[in-house]
Image (cartoon, helix red, strand yellow):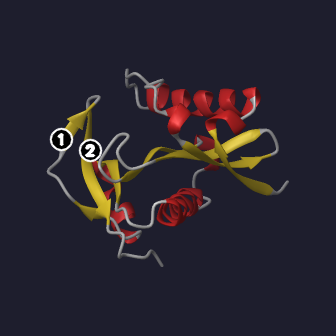
Amino acid sequence: MSMRWLVADFDELTNRELYEVLRLRQEVFAVEQTCVYQDADGLDMEAVHIGCWEGESLLAYQRCLPPGLQETESTLGRIVVATAARGRDLGRELVRRGIEHNQQRWPDQDIRIHAQAHLEKFYNELGFVTDSDVYQLDDIPHLEMVLSRLGKPD
């Protein structure tokens, strides 16, 4: 079965696609990482949603937010790969697609992420530079990282 990538505004998502996005986020962020947080934070409706699908299964997902909504810069967030799809380099491809999207849509803006601290090297390899000390976000160590609008990923 072949993979397909979907880029959609909130109102373009079908009910089934939205359900799968929320299911995957809950499965990984709430259950796997045993983290209680407000996932439905009001930002999804303003986001562009990027997902990798195989049939009806959502393998990887992220949301792209415009500058000024969550941060001064544009942002990538809710970056997640399904447990069963790990090891296929989908996370790297997902983030590259998010970077490309944000750079095309908001070319005069840097991209900021709130990365889990253990993924710092992964994001460094994609061009992000650490921009904060480690801090706790929902009881998980995080770092703020920035990709300069002048920086281009490989």
Depth check: give the residue in front, 67 or 5: 67
Residue 63: image x %, image y %? 52, 44
Q: Using the rendered view, name the quadrant where residue 17 is placed.
A: top right
In the picture shown, does residue 109 fall above or below 114? below
Depth check: give the residue in front, 86 or 102: 102
Q: Which mark is residue 105?
A: none
Seen at 29% across and 49% down, the residue is: 72
Seen at 30% across and 60% down, the residue is: 146
Q: Residues within 10 Å of mark 1 (few under 14, many from 20)?
A: some
Depth check: give the residue in front, 44 or 84: 44
Residue 74: image x %, image y %? 39, 53
The residue under label 1 is which amino acid type? Answer: Tyr
Q: Is residue 11 left or right of residue 109?
A: right
Q: Is residue 103 left or right of residue 15?
A: left
Q: Secondary structure at mark 2?
A: strand
Residue 26: image x %, image y %? 53, 27
Q: Using the rendered view, name the quadrant where residue 150 is placed.
A: bottom left
Depth check: give the residue in front, 38 or 68: 68
Disc 1 designates what residue? 135
In the picture shown, does residue 119 fall above or below 11? below
CB atoms of marks 2 and 1 within 8 Å: yes
> How many numbered badges does the structure rendering display?
2
In the picture shown, does residue 57 fall above or below 138? below
Q: Residues within 10 Å of mark 2 (few under 14, many from 20)?
A: many
Q: Is residue 28 left or right of residue 140?
A: right
Seen at 39% across and 62% down, the residue is: 122
Label 2, label 1: how far apart the Cα atoms are: 5 Å
Q: Which mark is residue 142?
A: 2
Q: Is residue 85 left or right of residue 133?
A: right
Q: Earlier in the sequence, mark 2 or mark 1?
A: 1
